[in-house]
Image (spheres, grey):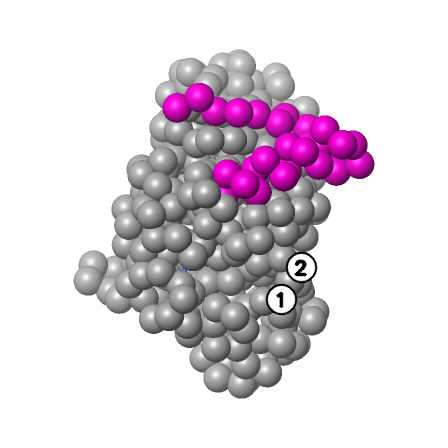
Amino acid sequence: MKTEYVERPDLKTEEGIQGIRRAGEIIRRGGLVVFPTETVFGLGGNALDADAAQKIYAAKGRPSDNPLIIHIADPSEAALYTETSDLFVRLAKRFMPGPLTVVLPAKPVIPKTVTAGLPTVAVRCPSHPVAHALIAAAGVPIAAPSANLSGSPSPTTFAHVKEDLDGRVDMILGGECSIGVESTIVRIDGENELTLLRPGGITPEELGEFARVTLSAAVLDKLKEGERVQSPGMKYKHYAPKTPLYLLRGDQTARMRYLDAQTGKFAVLAYTEELAALRFHPASPVLFDLGSVTDPSEQLHRLFFLLREADKAGCERIYAALPGTTGLSLALYNRMIRAAAYQIIDTN
Ligand code: AMP
Ligand code: MG
């Protein structure tokens, strides 16, 4: 199919508004539109249309047992599609619109194709102005997973979306993704109980002000053989570059000593503070600036972009430091251990 583009939709111009209006029509009549959100790009279709959901799985090459998140224009609309609760309302007041997805019991209006047969559905209200305008223009909730081919890192730029989905969707809207990794997903288990299924831009510490937060086992570790998954997406190899990625555990001195001993063609996703020393490495590694060691939000913002760019550098392997697991770093840790297929090297 021929994909239509609006690379920089500007809601202040008539042209931009017309583009969003056309995109809304495409969604309403069962087509697919890629759109920017504050997390990553989404691959959207009408969440009330089982055929549209089927097309999303096909366009991504995604297994259809991995459910989709439905995107709404206002948190109050969640009650149309799910059984909400007081805790949902309190979370919505504090974090929506924004990068928080909440899993709630689904109402029958949501097709089983969207929920992959589960009795629950994941709901999010994005803050990105283009995403918001698109949902409003469509007049229906939009089911949207990340706009990558299944298995590769989620796209955070127009160029990366095109690499994966040109010719597979009706339209692509461009824009900026300020956060750079997918939303935080929580399941409400009671009025004072949340399970964190996937970390993201909203931290467990922030959520802890509203309820007791339990981390799903798959957040920090590989699922064990035969273990039940709470969030189907966690069982798939994810976010992975084609070049093997290795994560280095250890302090800066130990990691640098390890890298000093490396030969051959390799790339490093390095903290800004460590770039200068690596520039004089005899093997001339391909260097990418992951952001300051003290700024996990910058690191999150760059991670998926750099994983895709590092893959194009023609290296045998990629190295990066193993992040911590508190605050925003938890989301980095969760994505990076999957991108590395759990290959962690102790350098101490
Ligand atoms: P993506 O939109 O690509 O970030 O993927 C959405 C992720 O949300 C899936 O991989 C699931 O793990 C998770 N998810 C969606 N719906 C549910 C649900 N009803 N229960 C648990 N996890 C869900
Ligand atoms: Mg995804």
- The image position of residue 274, as x and y in percent, is 64, 32
Residue 142 in view of the camera = yes
Label number found at residue 97: 2
Residue 53's spot in the image, x, y percent?
37, 49
Question: Residue at (47%, 17%) from the top-left corner?
Answer: 313
Q: Residues within 10 Å of mark 1 (few under 14, many from 20)?
A: many
Task: Please state which amino acid type lies under the numbered disc 2.
Answer: Pro
Q: Residue furthest left?
A: 226
Q: Is residue 53 left or right of residue 42?
A: left
Which residue lies at the image location 71% right of the left edge and 36% below the top edge?
17
Residue 9 magenta-drawn? Answer: yes
The one nearer the camera, 211 or 346, is 211
In the image, 283 versus 317, the foreground residue is 317
Q: Which residue is mark 1?
A: 75
- The N terminus - image quarter: top left
Residue at 24 percent of width and 65 percent of height = 227
Q: CA distance from mark 2 to mark 1?
A: 7 Å
The secondary structure type at the circle numbered 1 is helix
> Looking at the picture, does residue 300 appear above or below residue 183?
above
The crowd level at tag 2 (other Cα within 10 Å; few <14, some 14-19, many 20+) is: some
**Residue 13 to residue 114: above or below:** above
Q: Quarter-wise, where is residue 261 in the image?
A: top left
271 sits left or right of 28 in the view: right
Instruction: State yes or no: discs 2 and 1 in contact (Cβ < 8 Å).
Output: yes
Q: Nearer the viewer, mark 2 or mark 1?
A: 1
Residue 157 is situated, as x and y percent measured from the top left of the image, at 58, 31
> Which range of residues does the magenta coloring cover?
1-27
Q: Is residue 339 visible from the viewing direction of this image?
A: no
Query: What residue is rendered at 75% in x and 38% in y?
Result: 11
